[in-house]
Image (spheres, grey):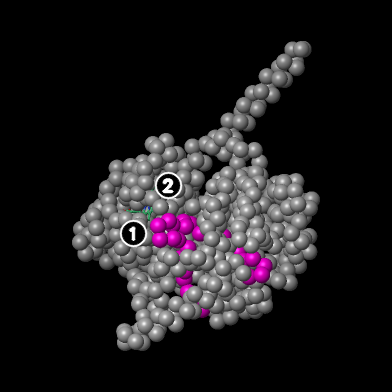
Amino acid sequence: MSRSTAKQGRCARIVALALYLTAGVRGADYLSPSALVADSKGGSLYIAEATAKQVAVLDLALDEVTRTFSVPDEPSGLALSRDGSRLYVTCGSAQGRVHVAHPRSGESLDTLPVGHTPTAPVLSPDGKRLYVCNSLDDTVSVIDTEHRREIARIRVSREPVAASVTPDAKWLYVGNQLPDGPADAGPVACKVSVINIETLSVDVSIVLPNGSTGLRGLAVSPDGSFVFVSHLLSRYTVPTTQLERGWINTNAITIIDAADRKLIETVLLDDVDYGAANPWAVACTADGKYLCVTHAGTHELSLTDVDAMLDKIKSHRERQSRDARSSGSGPGASYGYGGESVSDIPNQLSFLHGIRRRVRLGGRGPRALVVVDHKAYVAEYFTDSITMVDMGHKSRVETTSIALGPKKQMTAVRRGEMLFHDALLCFQGWQSCASCHPADGRPDALNWDLLNDGLGNPKNTKSLLLAHETPPAMITGVRDTAEAAVRAGIRHIQFATCPEEDAAAIDEYLKSLKPAPSPYLVKGELSGSAQRGRQVFEKAKCSSCHNGPLHTDLKKYDVGTGRGREKGLEFDTPTLVEVWRTAPYLYDGRAVTIKEVLTKYNPDDKHGATSDLTERQINDLAEFVLSQ
Ligand code: HEC
Ligand code: HEC
């Protein structure tokens, strides 16, 4: 061997090692399938592979990936034109865009700017409009696909993440992940925004039952009669003393009458002694017979007989009103959460018994779902795999697992991310950490009466971003560190035990979270108003407690916010980083806006000197805070 080849060989090995290390550390070699779309003839499946920043093409005759092509950023959603000539890929964060690619060659055809962290692109039936959910600026972009430009941006509720158009092309249903109101007054629930496609405005917001949060999936039935929405139904009004019988979190599907745009019923997907945690994507079979739901927490696919479910709802209601009439006790048992529904169905854990089948999948983290004929394809985020569930047999389903790439060793961060989203780390599979901390450890917007600080004093869920850098943990600081809070969460909220190694992996995952850029920034910089607000921040003495790069001195104060038995209590100064994303505010989530924190809930100037500020100064200050 000549010297130069030996040297080249060594260099190649060093390069290979370096690549291995960086890939291992940053997890750049995972695929993370996050969205699926099938072509109309059912020949191939396009798979958005988030962390690999690419789209893979799975040949459905071969059950094999035949091609991949890169996209400019982590892809979050896919839509395919009916003639199969254009693939729309949503990607990016603050500068979100739709990347338009030629599906066969992967060639880039166009890039269209949209809003913050776009996802769930959906085409109108004629293909002339593309609708995109901008999940972190609470809007929906409407794109004219012929002229390739955005023609409208419609404000919806909070964190839109799922959308579907009715077959008559009249309504766009948009599912919002989080409640948008205060957490201390009900109903606290996320909404479905119904957009009139002709006027491009929200016609009605359908409020899901009290405690609905973590909405992920939405699908219109093939005949256009119903809209199915997957979400959690959280029992946040009771203390978190046990998990049995869905005491803390239950997992649900809501059925909406598409023509009337009204909620029909909410049905639980759990069983009496085993939860079906973290329902994610929803799809119907083409004949409308089955409703398919992925469960990202318990690694399953639910198959529900739609007609049997609707019949059961009808006969249950008839029986309920008959019983109520004969006992003279009003309209029947109340749902009991202050919502409008008088049905007791949302409390019945065995409602779907006998009409729903739970199919255990091979991989971990089933999220995206697409149905082609009688086959459901489920993308398993953490194991880089697809499970195909064949429903074409009369009395059984068959599953086939398809690997999208070689098996990889998991880094601690990746493993922690998987465990955080895993309901196997919970007694009876009712919930994962992500049930209350849904979007990468951010809060669910609910108040929970956890037991760490006594009973009867609910607290608003905290964001876990920077939790490890800002001790103590919990708003009252009852845990010295976030590490302690993670272990307490596993023991006392999940009622589980796990090896220390797993808890440490969750720490690593949470430490790896990065703040998303504020939508209030203009080209990455403070706006004029926010710049003025920065001065007000000093003047009003906010920085005496909210100081340093994370805007907290890590100390506790009584800022006059404590109410009832918490009057005079000191709370840990929270970081203000990403506060634009974590409403509602204060320990009990009573404030919906930053302005409310500074005015309505600061009457005595105990929380900064705000009473002498002019309205403009308050606006500027709020703008500055929201820009962090
Ligand atoms: C039932 C809902 C719920 C579940 C499930 C849940 N949490 Fe929490 N978590 C909360 C609430 C509410 C708070 C804030 C409570 C407070 O401040 O007193 C919180 C706070 C935390 C904090 C402290 C953050 C800080 O900066 O102070 C950590 C860390 C945490 N949770 C981790 C986890 C982990 C890990 C899991 C899964 C093992 C988990 N949580 C499951 C509701 C939940
Ligand atoms: C004396 C220390 C102190 C000062 C001064 C102070 N804060 Fe705070 N801040 C806190 C504490 C403690 C909390 C938690 C209060 C609670 O949860 O009820 C808090 C909460 C907040 C929150 C809510 C965060 C959330 O996630 O719920 C915002 C926003 C905020 N402060 C902004 C400001 C601004 C703006 C000023 C200046 C006008 C200011 N603070 C002055 C200590 C302080």
Magenta segment includes 535: no
| Vertical relation: 542 (above or below) 211 | above
Please name the residue that numbered disc 2 is placed on: 425
Q: Is mark 2 within 8 Å of ligand 1?
A: yes
Stretch in magenta: 262-288
Query: Going from the N terminus, do you reach mark 2 or mark 1 first?
Result: 2
x%, y% of residue 462?
38, 54
**Of residues 260 and 87, the one drawn nearer to the viewer in this rendering:** 260
| Secondary structure beneath label 1 | strand
| Secondary structure beneath label 2 | helix
Q: Is residue 534 left or right of residue 258?
A: left
| Quadrant of residue 624 within the rendered picture | bottom left
Work out which quarter of the rendered image holds the N terminus and state it.
top right
Please name the residue that numbered disc 1 is placed on: 448
Residue name at image x 52 percent, y 41 percent: 414
Q: Is residue 105 left or right of residue 357?
A: right
Q: Is mark 1 within 8 Å of ligand 1?
A: yes
Give the CA distance from mark 2 to mark 1: 20 Å
